[in-house]
Amino acid sequence: MITHEELKWQVFHWSKKIGVKPIEIHVREMKRKWASCSSKGRLTFNKAIMKKSEDFLKEVIVHELLHLKYPNHGKMFKVLMRSYLNAKN
Ligand SMILES: [Zn+2]
């Protein structure tokens, strides 16, 4: 299980790689989702995610950050998602 700080660090790490700047990062309890992002760039992560595996975490983080560039799950979104997830770090 990771801490809030570690989660935020991961988000910053991936933000730099992807080239986006989330304005706020929140961690709280959520009922139906692992994370969400507002059009203004505010990211919210489900607290429960801190108990998940590193791979899962990475997937959720990259997914949300990519939404700051691409609002939907189109072709570019999928291509980039796959390439970031296949990267070693
Ligand atoms: Zn999505």
Image: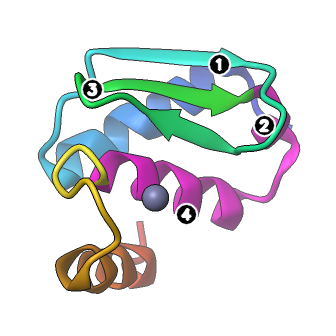
Instruction: Tell me how far mark 1 sits from mark 3, CA to CA.
Output: 14 Å
Which residue position is annotated with label 4? Answer: 59
State the image coordinates of residue 33 (x, y, percent, origin top left): 71, 44
Q: Badges 1 and 3: C-beta atoms under 8 Å apart?
A: no
Q: Amino acid at mark 3?
A: Gly
Q: Which structural element holds mark 2?
A: helix
Instruction: Tell me how far mark 1 sits from mark 4, CA to CA.
Output: 16 Å
Which residue position is annotated with label 2? Answer: 50
| Residue at 87% from the left image edge and 42% from the top image edge | 51
Q: Badges 2 and 4: C-beta atoms under 8 Å apart?
A: no
Query: How many numbered marks, from 0 up?
Result: 4
**Nearest to N terminus: mark 4 or mark 3:** 3
Q: Amino acid at mark 1?
A: Val
Q: Amino acid at mark 4?
A: Glu
Q: Badges 4 and 3: C-beta atoms under 8 Å apart?
A: no
- Image quadrant containing the C terminus: bottom left
**Crowdedness near tag 2: few (<14), some (14–19) or many (≥20) residues, C-alpha within 10 Å:** some
Quarter of the image where one finds residue 72: bottom left
On the picture, is 9 further left or further right than 15?
right
**Nearest to N terminus: mark 1 or mark 3:** 1
Magenta residues, start to end? 47-66
Q: Which mark is residue 27?
A: 1
Instruction: Tell me how far mark 1 sits from mark 2, CA to CA.
Output: 9 Å
Q: Amino acid at mark 2?
A: Met
| Residue at 43% from the left image edge and 36% from the top image edge | 11
**Crowdedness near tag 4: few (<14), some (14–19) or many (≥20) residues, C-alpha within 10 Å:** some
Nearest the viewer among 49 and 70 is 70
On the picture, is 89 further left or further right than 26?
left
Which residue position is annotated with label 3? Answer: 41
Q: Which structural element holds mark 4?
A: helix
The answer to whether residue 28 is magenta is no
